[in-house]
Amino acid sequence: MAVRVDLNISLDGFATTTGQTPESPMGEDWSRLVAAYVATRTFRERVLHDTSGEGTTGVDDKYARAYFDGIGAEIMGAGMFGLHHYPDDPDWRGWWGDEPPFRAPVFVLTHTAPRPPMEMAGGTTFHFLTTTPQEALKLAREAADGKDVRVGGGATVVRDFLKAGLVDRLHVGIAPVLLGRGIRLWDDLRGLESDYRVTAEVAESGTTHLTFSR
């Protein structure tokens, strides 16, 4: 069992865009950051439920398939779930739709009062926690039943897990775009590469896929 991270970041290291609103929850630059990923056949099938066979099938799709393979549980921050915009609405069910793509238990880290578990179609159940990365990982490992645990984001949550030495494999898809603002992944992680073996692969889209493996 491994603890995995998969993120898209810009050339200048930003993993989270700015300008999020309830109408545009990912922010105005999000489409530029993830363009290669959302163009893949795997994304279209798994997230958009598009079974037409449309989408790219090259290097980017290889990493998109790997993103979903072997995951038994997910950990994410409140922002990735969507709690920041509706913190006091008990009926808010996140912005992943009625059938989120995770198909596994998802543990949402929040600083507000935890909510009851939220069961969705397709096998996803959201569990809301106010706890440390270590304790969240312990619960996720138990729920994963021998499969991998993915720390999905956002960037601040991922950085907390990296700083604590809890991540076994980190994959970043570096998009050939400059954002100039947002939340940077690499802040306060000087020398991170010394704990990992680093490999690189460039996709047809110009995205550079870096993988840090213990």
Image (cartoon, rainbow, N blue to C red):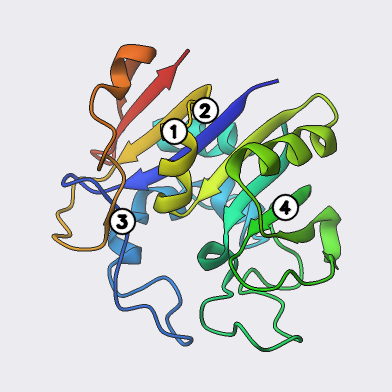
Find residue 148 and report its horizontal and vertical position in percent: 69, 29
Whichever of callouts 3 and 4 sits on the residue coming sooner in the sequence is: 3
Residue 133 sits above or below residue 192 on the image: below
The structure residue drawn at horizontal position 67% and vertical position 45%, both measured from the top left corner, is 74
Q: Are circles 3 and 4 on residues that touch, CB within 8 Å? A: no
| Tag shown at residue 106 | 4
The structure residue drawn at horizontal position 16% and vertical position 47%, both measured from the top left corner, is 12
The answer to which image quadrant residue 186 occupies is: top left
- Disc 3 crowd, CA 10 A, few/some/many (<14, 14-19, 20+): many
| Numbered disc 2: secondary structure | loop
Label 1 vs label 4: CA separation?
19 Å
Residue that carries the numbered disc 1 in the rendered image = 162
Whichever of callouts 2 and 4 sits on the residue coming sooner in the sequence is: 4
Find residue 147 and report its horizontal and vertical position in percent: 76, 27
| Numbered disc 3: secondary structure | helix
| Tag shown at residue 33 | 3
